[in-house]
Amino acid sequence: MLVRIAVEDVMRRDVAVVTPETAAREVARTLRDAAVGAVIVDADPQGIVTQTDIVDLIAADRDTTTVRAADLMSSPLVTIAPEETIEVAAGKMDRHDIKRLAVTEGRDIVGIITTDGVSDYVPKLANRESKRTHDLDSRLGVSYAEEDWEFERVDDTREGRIDVGDTVRFTKRIDDADVQAFARASGDTNRLHLDETFADETQFGERIVHGVLAVGVISAALARLPGLTIYLSQEISFREPIAVGETVTAMCEFVDRLGDNRYRLATRVFGEDGTVAIDGTATVLVQELPD
């Protein structure tokens, strides 16, 4: 027996909404506090601001106190009615190449539905996401990727070749399992990372991620470049702590070609609220993958 599943059956109802005049810094705080990847901008027309938009803003060194949500949002908002089926939702997300749809009744926003929310119910969408991951990994120097990891490369479409000005971005949630596994693998069992009661009494007020573990997200971004990326050096400064369970984004920009397939990069890791948690530079060697 086939069961019809409506959008309203799987949508998230507690939608984060901001006004067009909301400052980007406050948008970032809303994303962090609500633990969501996007906020709806209640404008005319309506729009959406994602965590990626905030990271791009900060990477461009723009003032988060003067830039407004209206300046950042993608508009018009792509919407769907709550009574539509999740198959219709999946098709609409596929056609627009987006990961979220606002669920509306008239102008009222009643929910939001994401690819994660429907992939368990729509095999076509699940297969599409799996194929993307498989195709990506088969031509890069990585063994696997999880569905909730996000990678993006911005270049001048030089058919896979790397050059100065290219940027890569990798987004991942660093959860308790990651922290526990890193502690066992490294031997760094500092109570600040593992003991919640202890960490609550420190200046941080909560458990934080190992700094070196967070730096590893930079390596993860570079590993997804075409070819084999080998680290030669990395200089880092820790600016802000990263809480356990926080979603972080590593952004790497190729700033100098050193010759012999070596490059210097500017590297940053952004916290969930868009602040720079780690800042630094790296030197890498990029080689062709072995046959």
Image: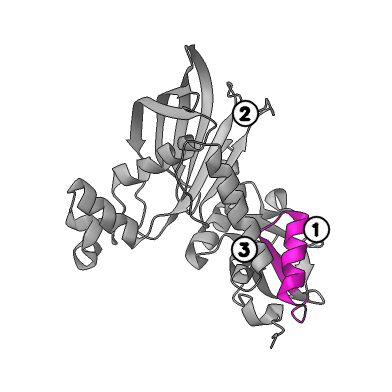
Q: Amino acid at mark 3?
A: Ala
Report if residue 18 is visible in the image. Answer: no
**Going 35% across and 28% down the picture, which residue do you hit?**
234
**Going 41% across and 37% down the picture, which residue do you hit?**
219
Q: Amino acid at mark 1?
A: Pro
Q: Nearer the viewer, residue 161 or 150?
A: 161
Q: Quadrant of residue 119?
A: bottom right
Q: Earlier in the sequence, mark 2 or mark 3?
A: 3
**Going 76% across and 64% down the picture, which residue do you hit?**
91
> Residue 272: x percent and y percent?
47, 54
Q: Nearer the viewer, residue 52 or 152?
A: 152
Q: Which mark is residue 76?
A: 1
Q: Earlier in the sequence, mark 1 or mark 3?
A: 1
> Residue 45: x percent and y percent?
81, 61
The span from disc 2 to disc 3 (Cα, nearest Å) is 27 Å
Name the residue that disc number 2 marks. Answer: 160
Read off the magenta span. 81-103
Residue 93, placed above or below residue 232: below
Name the residue that disc number 3 marks. Answer: 126
> Residue 67: x percent and y percent?
64, 47
Q: Of helix, strand and loop, which one carries label 2?
A: loop
The span from disc 1 to disc 3 (Cα, nearest Å) is 27 Å
Q: Nearer the viewer, residue 131 or 73?
A: 131
Q: Answer with left or right where residue 247 lies relative to residue 159.
A: left
